[in-house]
Image (cartoon, rainbow, N blue to C red):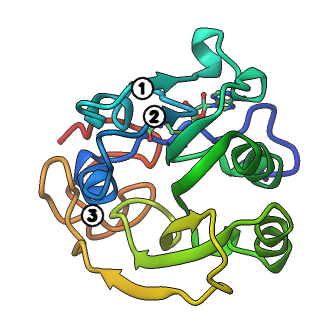
Amino acid sequence: MKSIQTRQKSNDIVFTPQKIVDIMVADIDVNMTILDPCSGKGVFYNSFKNNEKYKCEIENGTDFFEFNTPVELIYGNPPYSILTKWLEHSFKTATKKIKYIIGMYSLTPVRIDLATKHGWSVSSLILTQVPTWFQRSYIITFEKKECNNMIEFSSINLGNRCLYCKCPCGGMKGENISHCKRKMSDEKCYY
Ligand SMILES: C[S@@+](CC[C@H](N)C(=O)[O-])C[C@H]1O[C@@H](n2cnc3c(N)ncnc32)[C@H](O)[C@@H]1O
C-alpha cells in the first residue's frame, strides 16, 4: 500500500451514503440559504429540498476557497487532508450552522480552538461507523452562538453491512469476511 506521505494524489474523494446524508439533513430549516461546499456527485446538494442552495466542487471547476457569498448553513463531507484550512473558510462563510461528517481522529484541539476563535461552538457530536470507511466518524455540528462547547453527544449504529448492497463487509477494502467488493472511495459496490 502506498504511504500517505508519498502518494501523488490524496484519497479525499469519498462518497457519502444517502443514509448518512438523510440523517444529517433532517434538521435543515428550509427558509435558510445553504451551501454544499464539495458536492462530489451531489448527494448532499440533491438532498437540500426547498432551500435557496449553492454548491462547489473542485472537479467541476468551482473552488470552495473562492466562494465568498455568506450563507446561513453549510452541510457536507469535506476533504480531510485540508480540514483545518477548510474549517477556517467555513467559519468565515457560514453565519448560522455548519454540519460536517469528519473522521474521528480529525477532531483536534487546534480545530476546536479555531472554531472558538471565529465565534463558533460545537453543539452536537454523533459518533458513527460507516461500513467500509476505515475509521469511525463524527457528525459534528457547529453553531454560531455562545454555548461554551456544551455538546449533545450521541451515537448511531449503522451495523456492519454495506449500506448499498446490504452484504457483510469486512473493512475498507472489503477483505476477509466480506462479500461486498466496494472500496471506501467507490460510490457503489460491485457484488
Ligand atoms: C469526501 S469527498 C465528498 C464528496 C461528496 N460531498 C459526498 O459526500 O459524496 C470531498 C470532495 O471535496 C472535493 N474538493 C476538494 N477540494 C475542494 C475545493 N477546494 N473546493 C471544492 N471541492 C473540493 C473533492 O473533489 C471531493 O469531491
SS at circle 2: loop
Please state if 30 lies on the left or on the right of 106 as rendered: left
Point out the residue furthest to the left here: 166
Q: Which residue is mark 3?
A: 169
Cα distance in 3D space between marks 1 and 2: 6 Å
Check whether the beta carbons of the residues at disc 1 and disc 2 lie within 8 A of each other: yes
Frontmost of labels 2 and 3 is 2
Q: Is residue 61 left or right of residue 165?
A: right
In this rendering, the answer to whether 56 lies above or below 47 is above
Estimate the spatial distance between the alpha carbons at disc 2 and disc 3, rounded to whole Å: 37 Å
**Residue lying at 33% horizontally and 45% vertically, measured from the top left:** 182
Q: Residues within 10 Å of mark 3 (few under 14, many from 20)?
A: many
Residue 16, x across and y down, in percent: 38, 46
Identity of the residue drawn at 48% across and 29% down: 39
Q: Quadrant of residue 27?
A: bottom left
Q: Earlier in the sequence, mark 2 or mark 3?
A: 2
Residue 125: where, in percent of width, then height?
A: 49, 78
Q: Position of residue 109 (x, y in %)?
A: 81, 80
In this view of the protein, which residue sits in the foreground, 19 or 122? 122
Residue drawn at point x = 33 percent, y = 64 percent: 131
Which label sits on residue 33?
2
- Classify mark 2: residues with Cα within 10 Å, few (<14), some (14-19) or many (20+): many
What label sits on residue 53 in the rendered view? 1
Task: Answer few, some or many: residues within 10 Å of disc 1's Cα (few below 14, many 20 plus, some between 14 and 19).
Answer: some
Which residue is painted at 50% across and 71% down in the image? Answer: 138
